[in-house]
Amino acid sequence: MKNGITDKLNSAQAIWQVGKGDGVYLRVLNDDGSVCDWDFFSKWVKGLSGKPITIHNKLVRDRIPEIIKGNGKNAKVRQLTNYEYIRELRRKASEELNEYINSKSNEEAGEELADLLEVIHSLAEIHGYSIHDIEQTRKQKAEIRGGFKDRVFLIDVEG
């Protein structure tokens, strides 16, 4: 409110609560909530560019910025640090797993499983493994503990 963005208390609180988390992540806000990128913040809040801005704040496939540009739009991107990359891959794995869980058809399930597998490939690589290494570990565990093909559902264990 004191910066003239809004004169309504509820709007100011909403901007602060939502914007602080996303804003710090986007590097628009400092950790204390003060604005560090007024140009972007003004465009975001006031729409000064004249074009709508959709905030995504998520890891995307490598060619997505190229595809966005091919559609006549501009995308603001940055390269993640290793720590951020692992964190975002984990978020992406959760996102893709949820999309699979909520899929409505076998075709949709297959698409989401392919996306999840792509994330698994990237996670393996960032942790220093090849997908072959992961597959070998999977096979060893299957030999020792079995797989899930028999559909065994454990109810309880006594003693």
Image (spheres, helix red, strand yellow):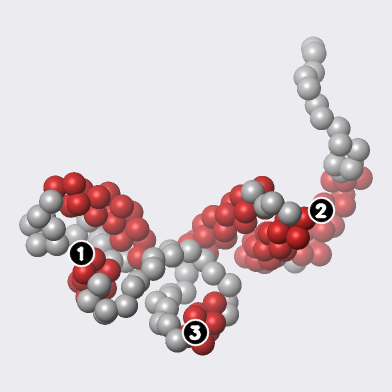
Quick one: label 1, few (<14), some, or many (20+) residues within 10 Å? some
57 or 138, nearer to the observer: 57
Query: Looking at the image, which residue is at 28% across and 55% down?
Result: 20
In this rendering, would 121 be left or right of 154?
left
Query: Looking at the image, which residue is at 54% across and 69% down?
Result: 60
Q: Residue furthest top?
A: 159
Q: CA distance from mark 3 to mark 1?
A: 31 Å
Quarter placement of the C terminus: top right
Q: Is residue 138 above or below residue 67?
A: above
Q: Is residue 109 above or below residue 121?
A: above
Quick one: label 3, few (<14), some, or many (20+) residues within 10 Å? few
Q: Identify residue for label 1.
A: 35
Give SS at disc 3.
loop
The image position of residue 89, as x and y in percent, is: 57, 60
Q: Identify residue for label 3.
A: 71
Q: Looking at the image, is mark 3 or mark 1 nearer the viewer?
A: 3
Q: Mark 3: which amino acid?
A: Asn
The image position of residue 1, as x and y in percent, is: 11, 55
State which quadrant residue 125 falls in: bottom right
In this rendering, would 9 be left or right of 141?
left
Q: Identify residue for label 2.
A: 137
Q: Looking at the image, is mark 1 or mark 2 nearer the viewer?
A: 1
